Amino acid sequence: MINLVDLRRQFQSVKHEILKGIDDVIESGQYVLGSKVKELEEKVAKRLGVSDAVAVANGTDALVLTLEAYGIGKGDEVITTPFTFFASAEAISRVGAVPVFADINLVTYNIDPSEIEKKITSATKAIIPVHLFGHPADMDNINKIAKKHELLVIEDACQAFGASYNNKKVGSLGDAACFSFFPTKNLGTMGDGGIITTSDGVLADKIRKLRTHGTTKKYYHDQIGYNSRLDEMHAAILLVNLTKIDEWNQARRRFAQRYRQQLGNTSHLKLPTEADDCYHIYHLFCIESEHREEITEALLNAGIQTGIYYPRCLHLQEVYSSLDYKEGDFPIAEALSEKLFAIPMHPFLSESEQDQIISILQQKEGN
């Protein structure tokens, strides 16, 4: 099977460095919020050009803690995309606020700034743009809208570590940003992990307090918090992978370009694009086709794994039925949910494997 993502190859490539980092943690006797976490936070902040990075247990917690630290809750609305992983909206609901959806751009699959402005009300407090599949959202226009209406911008950068927009790193483009270190992410660990980046020191301190049960002094609590801390083992793994992330992202970009070169004239497929002002890091390589089921079946029969991202838009999820959205409210997102599928994309894909994938996709042209 040619896998959509091959984590075994990835982690085998840095196995010795990871084992050394884990051994250092074992010898240190520090296993939660120790020196490795601090080093990771400092290196991520420096890399992204922000003042603070706060490591937490996972990407979902990163969103929840950021919203709560900003005081967003009951009676508030937060605008986001209906075409993303559930956590983007779930985090809004988790703090008691209401997710408000706006349709996406037909080309980038990211939230459309012109649709955002239509959704702003007196209850709107923030915008959460998602840098979907590793392609940065249209942040200049989003930030202009936010400034005009005095709204916060929280980047959901969970799929986009290493991407950039107008030569600025994703994670430094809004008031705060949230990343996931889930194993399949471009920068991932062997379990769950997340980090929040910001240049708002007050916000960072609030999040640090929230992640440790609402305390800055052990056993003294003045608010209800969370237990959302990154383990030292995961920080050690991430520090190793952080040294490789540029190399791995460049490999993804090479494979993306190769897909384009070979499949660009395949009439039944629409390939992902990259805006001129963006550095796309291809967390996923997703293709549109009216013949999705037929094509994915052919790939599976050839031993090639695919994935559907996303088969049901968030506004149509049962849990949000009370928000009274209906089919047809967001036509671009809904159409994509019927056509989009991902093909293998990871730094350790071989050209021979990619040729097999390309061959199957080209064969479907003549059928």
Image (spheres, rainbow, N blue to C red):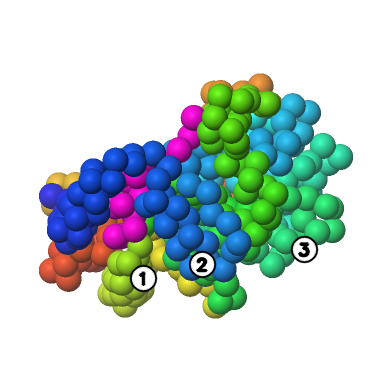
The answer to the question of whether label 3 and label 1 lie on touching residues, with beta carbons closer than 8 A, is no
Query: Percent x, y for residue 246?
Result: 36, 70
Callout 3: helix, strand or loop?
A: helix
* Label 3 Cα crowd, 10 Å radius (few <14 / some 14-19 / many 20+): few
Callout 2: helix, strand or loop?
A: helix
Dot label at residue 144? 3
Q: Which residue is mark 1?
A: 246
Q: Which residue is mark 2?
A: 46
The answer to the question of whether label 3 and label 2 lie on touching residues, with beta carbons closer than 8 A, is no
173 w.r.t. 295: above or below: below
Query: Mark 3 to mark 2: distance in Å?
Result: 26 Å
Q: Is residue 236 magenta?
A: yes
At label 3, the amino acid type is Lys
Magenta segment: 227-241
Of the pair 264 and 273, the residue shown nearer to us: 273
Callout 1: helix, strand or loop?
A: helix
